[in-house]
Image (tube, rainbow, N blue to C red):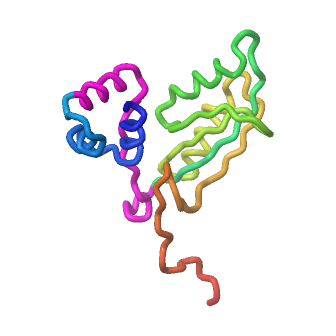
Amino acid sequence: MKDKIISMLENDARLTAAQIAAALGSDEKTVSAMIEELENEGVIAGYKAIINPELRKSDTVSALIELKITPQRDRGFNAVAERIRNYPEIQSVYLMSGGFDLALMMEGRTMRDIAYFVAEKLATIDGVTSTATHFVLQKYKDNGISFEAEKEDKRGIGW
């Protein structure tokens, strides 16, 4: 039943224990206890609202940052990853296969802020051998939630 609770909360974190219990044919007290247990175990690490950036009209910029790293003896990539994940500006850190070692997701006020952060904070970390920054131009889907693309084409093509 825990897997079903997790699945339901992944799809809609706003569901109450009563709603989940009704859907699963269980009682609210049992579901509440299971949710609390999942939270205490760290299986449920948190709850987050997914915001449509087009409707929020926010002036923030998102970037995917690739890092190549020289692994440290007995620590591999962990020491660098642990240091990077402590920066509040960094939203996600992933160890990757392929042409680079770590992938980071970051949000900043401007492209310049992100560029400064990469140059001054990330590129200067011991073990980081190169960086590549890719700025997000449009979000079509995030965390399983699809966003409707803008209806009006504002690129100025066809003038």
Q: Is residue 158 above or below residue 69?
A: below
Position of residue 88 in the picture relative to residue 68 (left or right): left
Residue beneath the point at 58% across and 28% down = 84
Residue beneath the point at 67% across and 31% down = 95
Residue 10, image quadrant = top left
- Residue at the far top: name it: 74
- Residue at the far right: name it: 99
**Quadrant including the C terminus:** bottom right
Residue 29, image quadrant = top left
Q: Is residue 59 above or below residue 27?
A: below
- Taking the magenta stretch, the answer to whether it contains residue 29 is no
Across and down, in percent, residue 127 comes to 73, 23
Across and down, in percent, residue 118 comes to 63, 38
In this view of the protein, which residue sits in the foreground, 134 or 151? 151
Residue beneath the point at 68% across and 28% down = 124
Total count of labels: 0
- Residue at the far bottom: name it: 159
- Taking the magenta stretch, the answer to whether it contains residue 46 is yes
In this view of the protein, which residue sits in the foreground, 141 or 136? 141
Residue beneath the point at 39% across and 20% down = 41
Across and down, in percent, residue 136 comes to 59, 56
Position of residue 42 in the picture relative to residue 104 (left or right): left
Across and down, in percent, residue 70 comes to 78, 23
Provide the residue span drawn in magenta: 30-59
Position of residue 79 in the picture relative to residue 154 (left or right): right
**Quadrant including the N terminus:** top left
Position of residue 37 in the picture relative to residue 42 (left or right): left
Q: Is residue 67 above or below residue 34?
A: below
